[in-house]
Image: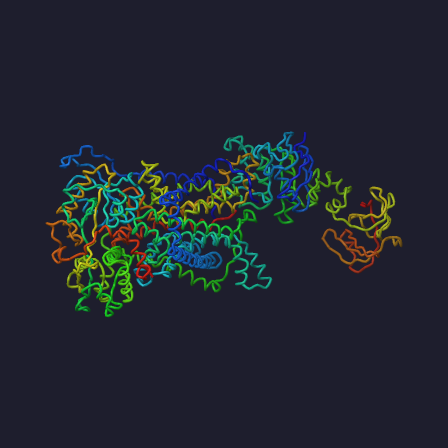
């Protein structure tokens, strides 16, 4: 049984198609990331799953129950068992933290409810904040309360809509970790919408990539990163270094040298490697690709350099910070591991 | 994001009721004027004299609306954006004209400067009385407007004034339009001030048809012209305002306010002091002077009229809010043809003078609600017709400013649409509801013509007492009632101004 | 910071409900006493009317009429429920209510309004013993309304500034009075006078006179009382008002402080108009006996004396003499018009507006 299943979901807004033949499923107890650039229709998809929009075509199933089919909503949003954590948490300003969390529970004043609220507060590590007001909490704490609120009624699936978009970058990672921890501890099923590929790859069990209104690929983070099916997916899920190449079965020759391919191809191709696959080559091998450093970026723990190769193509290499060469120096490179190639 | 869902019955039914209530005067007018046949209606309306009067009414409306837009916006900017101390006090003082009926204001002016009558006298009095209708929504919007946009404009080389004009003004434009519509409708319907100032507007002629022509049929026919003007105003305002966009923006944190130093605010201070001095000072000082020069005050009579005004005011406020609430929610959340029509219908009769509304209630009340005739319920009903648009507008604005995401979350947590309205939408809109209720209470306390006709025989309110003594020029007797009315009305005014401008926006 | 919490909402809501309920309970007490229609009606008035309530729609002010109604109740035991408003608006109200009107008596400040209600067939014919109390020109031709008091048009003048006041309407147009005449353009009595002018002289002649009057740059004032005060103060030399305003002033400040005097044209022209306040009984009334008792009272010595003493108005019944300084009604020589013709007030307003005498 899958907690959520979409089949052939298509939707348009006023003659503009927004989603095309979307189909994937989410297994219970897993975190799935819905990854795609901004404006691609992710929010629409969330609203369809919640029940605020009805898909013009396709079937939406929650816990094996069909909730929407081909332009007809069969189950109202309040009965779907879909939890929602919106972009800014959206805690009810007129209720305390405890009241917010208890909102979706029946018999809000009973002791069972109080227990459940305590349980949820502990889950998100905010046990002492029960009687505080939303505006007294920091952004990250608000998000955690929002999650607790969504999880309290034990939904079939929790939807998180770009939950950290409004937080500082520094905070983002910490809060992200806390939320993921809470989700795992509760055993909840989650669908997490984001445009941040780092977020998707690090938090999710499975990633669904939404590009150009369609699902481009669905798989584990490793699959997506190492074996993207298309060039767009490859470029979207991680930084991609592109060079032209000529493929000859299992190898391709390019300005970066002879590269071993993950999939055999023939003819002119675009070869893609990840910046971390490019290293400095100090073996003085005249065969190694040579180039001149035209820019460097220092990130503290590591850095990147832009190198212009002899044929004019520019590649990006990610290196340990202490290995960064200066701008203008001539260096030799080598590629570790296999390269991706697309026709 | 607009919601094009079908409205739930629990909202649509009260909305239908509100439309019926609002259309009572229209039905009365059509029924009465058509008694002499359609031909007579047409010829009555298309007299050349009608055109002159309509032109004069429109001229007065345009002048006052323009003046209110300017004065109101300047005052709003002063209260929100300057670094003046005691901000809340200034806000309350500037809102006080709402506590003063226009007939009282006009009366104070004309006894002070008797030659101060005619078009410009009326225009001044009406402007001083109605600029808060623009000031309050503009101030509220200014408070929530993003000051960073101004900074960006400045960084692009635009001066302070230019930034105000090109950036801030655009941001607050919808509030200016909404307030201006209310002002325009009010000027069109006003009779108290124009009568005292002796300027012949269209309402004068309608009253003339009652008081001198003893011809309610002719008056009804002429009133149809006012309905047409109101329709025109509503349509124009909607076109210019555009659909109010959902507020985009931050979460529960408050938007920071950039304040201008007092030196920049000095020119605005002139307008502010003028507004308070002339709009509030003149009527208040006059009333107190009358009271001091008058004979002994009959305190028991004063107290009982205060009680009556308060009672009727509170009932009107409560009833109007109850009816306006579903309508406001409907219009704010379920946009579409039907709700457009509802909104228009509720506003259209706001241009009618009080006597027309009163007679329409008499017309139906005496046939269909005889036991209630000349009882409090029908008086409240008549006043509800007049003030419904104010409360609906206030509720609507408040709900539109609140983000739909709260309601989405509520539904995702298992709360049905109707329950969500009670648990989330209404609590979040409480400031707007309170403001609307205050507006209705204020209006009811000041209201005169409808009260005179629909009141239970023998019930005197502060307004009718003022009228009673002013008709025999007994200024001394007017004094205590005028002062009491302004004091009583000051409370809902204070609530209204504080809630509208100083509330936290979520 | 205003956070409208759920608890605050509940408190506000409870307080509001409590307040509204309290108000509703207290203010619903404003309803009129119970209606008892008189079932036993005897023409000779022997039916016991004590304790009955009649409803009056009065266009005359409360400050003036309330004491008289109280006196009436003390003398007859009939309770009066009086609704006060503008005469014309009360007439409009009665016309809108039609035969379902709760009013028993309509008391109007002027004849035009009475005429309009009469024309709509809403007034009952008065019994002979009432109608014979006044001269025919002071009641409707159908005997459906009757005058209770009269107001004479006068020229009040400042004795220190004016040796000989104008002797006729046309002399008012003389250039020597340019800028020196005060009037109240929105006052109903002035407009009734102009209506009488139209009736007596015809539309064209009336318009000519008005144009001449306007050319003499009369000074506009808010009300008649203000005109009188201006004349007494010397701001203007003449004032076109009603006769009783002078005596109001004298009784307030003493004769020594008043230099103004009334001048009566007594020429049978519109300037000598005696306008009336009057009363009618509605056909829809179920209390005609009690209503008639009120009308009789108004025309009795007690009632008529009230008007002469309180407001210095002219009594309508013989046997009650006007205030000693006033000329008698016959001496006034009012124009011989049907007072009901004063009904076309709206046309008068239109003409005044065209000539520029109505508003600025």
Q: How many marks?
A: 0
Q: Position of residue B125 (x, y in %)?
A: 37, 58
Q: Position of residue A299 (x, y in %)?
A: 72, 53
Q: Position of residue A73 (x, y in %)?
A: 60, 34
Q: Position of residue C301 (x, y in %)?
A: 12, 47
> Residue B49's image quarter?
bottom left
> Residue A332's image quarter?
bottom right
Q: Is residue B12 left or right of residue A68?
A: left
The N terminus of chain A lies in which quarter of the figure? top right
Q: Residue furthest right?
A: A286
Q: Is residue C41 left or right of residue B52?
A: left
User: As rendered, which of A47 and C162 lies closer to the eye?
Assistant: C162
| Residue sitting at x 79%, y 50% | A242
Q: Residue furthest left?
A: C319
User: As rendered, which of A201 and C207 lies closer to the eye?
Assistant: C207
User: As rendered, which of B302 and C58 lies closer to the eye?
Assistant: C58
Q: Can the viewer see residue B435?
A: no
């Amino acid at each position: 049984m899958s907690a959520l299943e979409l089949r052939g979901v298509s939707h348009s807004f006023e003659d503009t198609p927004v989603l095309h033949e979307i189909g994937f499923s989410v297994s219970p107890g897993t975190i799935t990331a819905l990854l795609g650039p901004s404006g691609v229709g992710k929010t629409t998809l969330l609203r369809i799953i919640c029940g605020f929009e009805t898909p013009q075509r396709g079937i939406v199933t929650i816990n094996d129950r069909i909730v929407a089919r081909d332009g007809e909503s069969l189950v109202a949003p309040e009965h779907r068992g879909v939890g929602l954590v919106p972009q800014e948490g959206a805690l009810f300003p007129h209720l305390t933290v405890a009241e917010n969390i208890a909102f979706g529970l029946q018999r809000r004043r009973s002791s069972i409810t109080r227990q459940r609220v305590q349980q949820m507060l502990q889950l998100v590590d905010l046990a002492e904040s029960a009687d505080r007001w939303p505006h007294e909490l920091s952004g990250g704490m608000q998000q955690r309360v929002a999650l607790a609120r969504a999880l309290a009624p034990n939904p079939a699936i929790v939807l998180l809509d770009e939950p950290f978009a409004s937080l500082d970058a520094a905070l983002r990672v910490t809060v992200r970790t806390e939320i993921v921890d809470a989700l795992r501890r509760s055993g909840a099923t989650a669908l997490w919408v984001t445009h941040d590929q780092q977020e998707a790859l690090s938090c999710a069990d499975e990633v669904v990539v939404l590009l150009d209104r369609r699902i481009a690929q669905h798989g584990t983070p490793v699959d997506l990163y190492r074996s993207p099916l298309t060039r767009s997916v490859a470029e979207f899920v991680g930084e991609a270094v592109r060079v032209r190449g000529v493929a000859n079965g299992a190898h391709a020759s390019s300005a970066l040298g002879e590269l071993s391919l993950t999939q055999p191809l023939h003819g002119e191709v675009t070869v893609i490697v990840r910046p971390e696959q490019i290293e400095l080559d100090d073996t003085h091998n005249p065969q190694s690709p040579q180039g001149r450093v035209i820019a460097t970026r220092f990130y503290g723990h590591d850095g990147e350099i832009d190198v212009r190769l002899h044929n004019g193509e520019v590649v990006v290499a990610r290196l340990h910070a202490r290995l960064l060469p200066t701008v203008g120096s001539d260096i030799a490179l080598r590629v570790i591991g296999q390269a991706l190639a697309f026709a | 994001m607009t919601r094009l869902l079908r409205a739930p019955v629990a909202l649509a039914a009260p909305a239908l009721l509100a439309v019926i209530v609002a259309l009572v005067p229209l039905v009365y007018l059509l029924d009465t004027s058509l008694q002499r046949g359609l031909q007579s209606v047409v010829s009555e309306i298309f007299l050349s004299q009608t055109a002159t009067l309509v032109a004069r009414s429109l001229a007065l409306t345009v002048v006052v609306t323009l003046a209110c837009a300017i004065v109101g916006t300047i005052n709003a900017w002063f209260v929100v954006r300057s670094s003046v101390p005691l901000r809340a006090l200034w806000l309350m003082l500037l809102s006080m004209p709402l506590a003063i009926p226009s007939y009282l204001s006009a009366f104070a002016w004309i006894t002070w400067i008797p030659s101060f009558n005619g078009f410009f006298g009326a225009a001044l009095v009406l402007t001083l009385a109605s600029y808060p209708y623009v000031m309050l929504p503009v101030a509220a919007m200014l408070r929530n407007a993003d000051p960073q946009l101004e900074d960006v404009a400045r960084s692009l080389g635009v001066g302070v004034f230019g930034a105000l004009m090109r950036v801030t003004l655009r941001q607050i434009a919808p509030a200016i339009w909404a307030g201006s519509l209310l002002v325009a409708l009010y000027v069109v319907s006003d009779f108290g001030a124009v009568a005292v100032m002796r300027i012949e507007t269209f309402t004068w002629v309608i009253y003339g048809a009652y008081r001198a022509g003893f011809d309610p049929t002719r008056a009804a026919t002429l009133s149809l012209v006012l309905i047409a003007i109101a329709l025109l105003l509503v349509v124009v305002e909607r076109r210019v305002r555009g659909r109010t966009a959902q507020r985009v923006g931050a979460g529960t944190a408050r938007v920071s306010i950039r304040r201008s130093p007092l030196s920049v605010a000095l020119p605005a201070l002139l307008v502010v002091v003028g507004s308070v001095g002339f709009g509030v000072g003149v009527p208040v000082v006059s009333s107190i002077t009358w009271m001091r020069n008058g004979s002994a005050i009959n305190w028991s009579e004063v107290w009982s009229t205060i009680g009556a005004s308060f009672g009727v005011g509170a009932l009107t406020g409560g009833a109007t809010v109850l009816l306006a609430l579903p309508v406001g929610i409907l219009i704010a959340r379920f946009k579409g043809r039907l709700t457009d029509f509802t909104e228009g219908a509720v506003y259209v009769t706001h241009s009618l003078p009080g006597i027309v509304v009163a007679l329409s209630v008499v017309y139906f009340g005496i046939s269909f609600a005889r036991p209630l005739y000349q009882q409090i319920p029908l008086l409240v009903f008549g006043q509800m017709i007049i003030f419904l648009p104010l409360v609906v507008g206030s509720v609507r604005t408040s709900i539109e400013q609140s983000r739909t995401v709260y309601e989405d979350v509520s539904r995702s947590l298992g709360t049905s649409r109707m329950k969500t309205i009670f648990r989330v939408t209404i609590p979040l809109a409480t400031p707007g509801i309170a403001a609307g209720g205050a507006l209705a209470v204020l209006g009811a306390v000041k209201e005169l013509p409808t009260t005179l006709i629909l009141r239970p025989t023998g019930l005197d309110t502060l307004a009718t007492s003022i009228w009673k003594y002013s008709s025999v020029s007994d200024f001394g007797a007017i004094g205590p009632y005028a002062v009491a009315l302004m004091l009583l009305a000051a409370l809902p005014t204070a609530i209204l101004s504080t809630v509208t401008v100083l509330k936290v926006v979520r | 910071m205003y956070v409208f919490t759920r608890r605050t909402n509940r408190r506000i809501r409870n307080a509001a409900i409590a307040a509204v309920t309290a108000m509703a309970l207290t203010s619903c007490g404003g309803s009129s006493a119970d209606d008892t229609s008189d079932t036993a009606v005897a023409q000779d008035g022997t039916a016991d009317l004590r304790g009955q309530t009649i409803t009056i729609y009065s266009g005359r002010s409360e400050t003036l009429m309330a004491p008289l109604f109280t006196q009436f109740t003390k003398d007859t035991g009939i309770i009066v429920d009086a609704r006060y408003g503008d005469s014309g608006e009360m007439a409009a109200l009665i016309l809108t209510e039609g035969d379902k009107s709760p009013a028993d008596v309509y008391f109007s400040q002027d004849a035009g309004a009475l005429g309009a209600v009469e024309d709509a067939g809403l007034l009952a014919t008065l019994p002979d013993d009432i109608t014979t109390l006044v001269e025919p020109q002071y009641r409707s031709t159908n005997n459906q309304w009757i005058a209770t008091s009269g107001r004479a048009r006068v020229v009040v003048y400042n004795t220190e500034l004016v040796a000989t006041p104008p002797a006729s309407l046309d002399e008012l147009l003389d250039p020597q009075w340019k800028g020196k005449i005060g009037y109240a353009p929105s006052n109903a009595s002035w407009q009734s006078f102009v209506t009488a002018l139209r009736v007596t002289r015809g539309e064209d002649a009336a318009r000519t006179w008005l144009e001449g009057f306007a050319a003499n740059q009369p000074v506009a004032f808010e009300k008649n009382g203000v005109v009188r005060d201006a004349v007494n103060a010397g701001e203007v030399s003449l004032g076109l008002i009603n006769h009783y305003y002078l005596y109001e002033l004298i009784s307030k400040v003493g004769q020594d402080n008043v230099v103004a005097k009334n001048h009566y044209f007594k020429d049978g022209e519109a300037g000598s108009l005696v306008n009336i306040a009057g009363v009618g009984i509605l056909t829809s009334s179920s209390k005609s006996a009690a209503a008639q008792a009120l009308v009789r009272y108004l025309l009795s010595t007690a009632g008529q004396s009230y008007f002469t003493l309180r407001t210095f108005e002219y009594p309508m019944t013989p046997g009650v003499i006007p205030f000693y300084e006033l000329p008698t009604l016959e001496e006034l020589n009012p124009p011989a018009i049907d007072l009901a013709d004063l009904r076309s007030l709206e046309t008068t307003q239109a003409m005044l507006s065209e000539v520029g005498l109505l508003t600025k």
